Structure formats: C-alpha cells, structure tokens
Image (cartoon, rainbow, N blue to C red):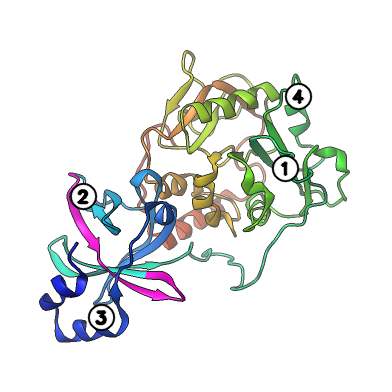
C-alpha cells in the first residue's frame, strides 16, 4: 500500500500539504477486531461535515449511513477501506493523527460524489442527548443491592425496571433454577426499598425514573452485566413464562441475531403497536428490519454499540429506528422470534406524553444525522 505522503500530497494545495505535514503521519497497521464497534464523524480537510455519526459495525457493515458509496468496510494491508455497493474501494485511509498512542483521526484522498478531497474520520462518541443531557464528566454508576458471587452466572441476562405491579415474577412460572438459562437484574423504580427476594440475582434501586437512564447506569465499563452473551431489556408489563425466555434466548443464539424480540400474540388483551411484531404461525424466526423498544434482545456486541443512545433517553421514542441503523441494517442478524409469543398488557402512551415523545424523537434523530425511511408494518 503506497503511503499517504508519497501518493497523495502532490495532488493537494499548499495549505493542505502544510496541515498534513504538521499533524499527520502514515497510519499504523489497523485491525478489524479493534475497529469494529467504533464511532466516527466523516468530513473533509476543508471543514465540511458530511456525517455526524458513522459506525464501523460488525461483519463489515457501515452503520447509520444511507449512501451507495459507503456500503461496507474492511481492513486491507492494515488500512481501513470503505467500499461502495459494488465492492469497489471508495476511500482508503492511509494517514492518521495519533494522540497518546491512540488513533483519533484517519484521512484518505478520494473522490466522493464527484468531489475530490482529503476525507477525514474523527473518532467520536454518541452525541449528547438533545433534550436533557447529563453534564460532561458526570459519572453515573448504579449500585447493586444484591449480586451473585463472582463466576456464578448463566449465559443470558434479563434486565427489567420494576415495581410492585410488575409482571416479572410470572416469568419464573414453569421453570426451575436448574433449567433456567438466564439471570435476572431488577432495577426497582418504586419509592419503597425493595425486598431482596424480588430478584434471585441482581437488584438495584432507582426510584422515580423512566426505563432507559437507570438501565444505562447498570452498564458501566466494568459492570458484571457485560459478562453475559445476550441481554433482554423488556418492559415490566409483558406476560410470558420462563420457558418462553429460554426458547427466545436459544433461537437468538441459533440464528446469530444481534437484535431481536419475541413476537406479540394476536389475542384479546395484547396491545400490538406495530403489525410487523404480531406473531405469525408456522415461523420460528422472521428476519425483519425493526425491533420495538418495548422488548429488545441484544447480543453483547450490539448492546455495546447501542447503549450510548439510551443514556439520557426520556421516552425512548425513535431508538428502535436508530438501533438497526447503527448496526448497518443487517438483513439476517435482526428478527422477530415468532415461535415465542408474549402478551403486552398495557396500551401505548399509557404512562407518558406522546406529543413530547415525538418531539424528543425528532431531536434525537437530528443529533445523529439519521435519515428516516418508512418500514412496512411499522406505525
């Protein structure tokens, strides 16, 4: 691979050459395993911002991008390459800016949409929430009232915000500890101090908060909850059994799903928000481009990518469109698990202001530069 300096500097203006000479060096050898799951902002050396939030998603998918020229990514000869939808290289990043031994910016000379320029990827994090962001550098870390001994865990995890009216005790019906394949973490939102018996494994107390902020606080950097292979984040008004959850986790693993959910039963008393999530008979798993915020099931690597989006989420509106986008809209790693049907017992909008939620969604999408595209069966 020819170096950035040798092959590209002669095509640039004097100002560009000076800037690169002062700040840049040839990119060190990169590894796909290290790059996978990282977040970047795409611009050029002239100061244009093209994409505020781009994800180098698993399996070479480019997340949160709707552009034929930015279809896939790979590492070739130690260089990050972006490919178009024909598999042809669009940008090869051959230069880097390194701070404290870490690559923070990559650059490559290319022609994109007819514009020849030095294109730049800046390493970023999830943008601050547009409505109620946490102050910078404020640490948020949940405290466990109860947790299992180190090393004593099952493969999967259920995390639920609950109070005294939660349906989660019914999830243990028909299953014993010797056959259960999932641990439970209860984040209690009632004002009263919860009894330790409400969860056999993990328990925290975060009163008077909505679903997502306290869940984010559970997944701090060295949290024991990151040790699980798959993590389900259901609402507390879902009726299902322990054997349902065993099968849900099993099929998610069997089909290699990064993002999934159980289907919703088509019966009286089950409130279905989106027709796409309704149970279909004769199907085990149905690959779909949408998973509802009510009951998302993540692989660990997918949750690591998506967790930052829930940090300050109030209603959660719009997250179920962002998550597939972050993962690059994988055609065969997202789905509805039809052979597991659950009952949603509470109608949409029963506990929050829908108008405010829609406004939050619009602001959130704008902060990520997300381009909405209608999905059949999603209201």
Question: Badge 1: few (under 14), some or many (20 or more) residues near its Cα, within 10 Å?
Answer: few
Element marked by disc 4 = loop
Which callout, 1 or 2, points at the residue further toward the start of the chain? 2
Does 90 appear in magenta? yes
From the viewer's side, name the closer residue of 335 and 97. 97
Which callout, 2 or 4, points at the residue further toward the start of the chain? 2
Give me the C-alpha separation between circle 4 and circle 1: 16 Å
Element marked by disc 2 = loop
Magenta-highlighted stretch: main secondary structure?
strand
From the viewer's side, name the closer residue of 261 and 56. 56
Q: Which residue is mark 2?
A: 84
Q: Nearer the viewer, mark 2 or mark 4?
A: 4
Image quarter (top left, top right, bottom left or bottom right) of the C terminus = top left
Highlighted magenta segment, given as a residue range? 86-104
Q: Which residue is mark 1?
A: 151
Give me the C-alpha separation between circle 3 and circle 2: 26 Å
Give me the C-alpha separation between circle 2 and circle 4: 50 Å
Q: Which residue is mark 4?
A: 178
Question: Badge 2: few (under 14), some or many (20 or more) residues near its Cα, within 10 Å?
Answer: some
Residue at 54%, 33% in the rendered image: 261
Left/right placement of residue 285 relative to residue 170 reads: left
Q: Nearer the viewer, mark 4 or mark 1?
A: 1
Left/right placement of residue 307 relative to residue 2 reads: right
Q: Which residue is mark 3?
A: 20
Does 12 appear in magenta? no
Which callout, 3 or 2, points at the residue further toward the start of the chain? 3
Which callout, 4 or 1, points at the residue further toward the start of the chain? 1
Element marked by disc 1 = loop
Left/right placement of residue 7 relative to residue 273 reads: left
Residue 342, placed above or below residue 260: above
Q: Position of residue 199 (x, y in %)?
A: 80, 39
């Amino acid at each position: 691979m020819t170096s950035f300096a040798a092959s590209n500097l002669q095509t640039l203006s004097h100002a560009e050459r000076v800037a690169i000479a002062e700040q840049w060096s040839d990119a060190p050898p990169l590894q796909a395993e290290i790059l996978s799951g990282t977040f970047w902002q795409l611009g050029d050396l002239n100061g244009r911002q093209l994409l505020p939030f781009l994800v180098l998603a698993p399996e070479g998918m480019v997340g949160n991008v709707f552009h034929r020229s930015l279809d896939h990514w790979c590492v070739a000869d130690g260089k990050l390459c972006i490919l178009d939808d024909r598999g042809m290289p669009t940008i090869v990043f051959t230069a880097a800016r390194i701070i404290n031994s870490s690559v923070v910016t990559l650059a490559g000379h290319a022609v994109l949409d007819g514009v020849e320029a030095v294109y730049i990827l800046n390493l970023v994090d999830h943008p601050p929430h547009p409505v109620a962001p946490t102050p910078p550098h404020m640490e948020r870390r949940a405290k466990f009232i109860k947790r299992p001994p180190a090393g004593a865990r099952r493969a999967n995890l259920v995390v639920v915000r609950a109070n005294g009216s939660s349906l989660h005790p019914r999830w243990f019906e028909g299953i014993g500890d010797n056959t259960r394949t999932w641990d439970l973490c209860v984040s209690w939102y009632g004002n009263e101090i919860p009894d330790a018996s409400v969860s056999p494994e993990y328990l925290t107390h975060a009163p008077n908060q909505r679903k997502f902020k306290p869940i984010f606080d559970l997944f701090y950097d060295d949290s024991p909850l990151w040790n699980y292979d798959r993590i389900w984040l259901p609402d507390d008004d879902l009726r299902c059994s322990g054997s349902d959850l065993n099968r849900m986790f099993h099929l998610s693993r069997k089909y290699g799903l990064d993002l999934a959910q159980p289907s919703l039963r088509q019966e009286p008393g089950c409130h279905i928000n989106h027709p796409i999530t309704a149970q279909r008979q004769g199907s085990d798993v149905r690959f779909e481009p949408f998973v509802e915020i009510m009951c998302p099931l993540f692989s660990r690597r997918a949750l690591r990518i998506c967790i930052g989006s829930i940090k300050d989420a109030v209603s959660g509106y719009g997250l179920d469109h962002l998550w597939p986008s972050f993962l690059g809209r994988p055609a065969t790693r997202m789905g509805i698990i039809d052979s597991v049907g659950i009952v949603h017992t509470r109608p949409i909008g029963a506990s929050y202001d829908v108008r405010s939620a829609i406004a939050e969604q619009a602001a959130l999408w704008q902060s990520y530069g997300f381009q909405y595209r209608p999905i059949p069966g999603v209201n």
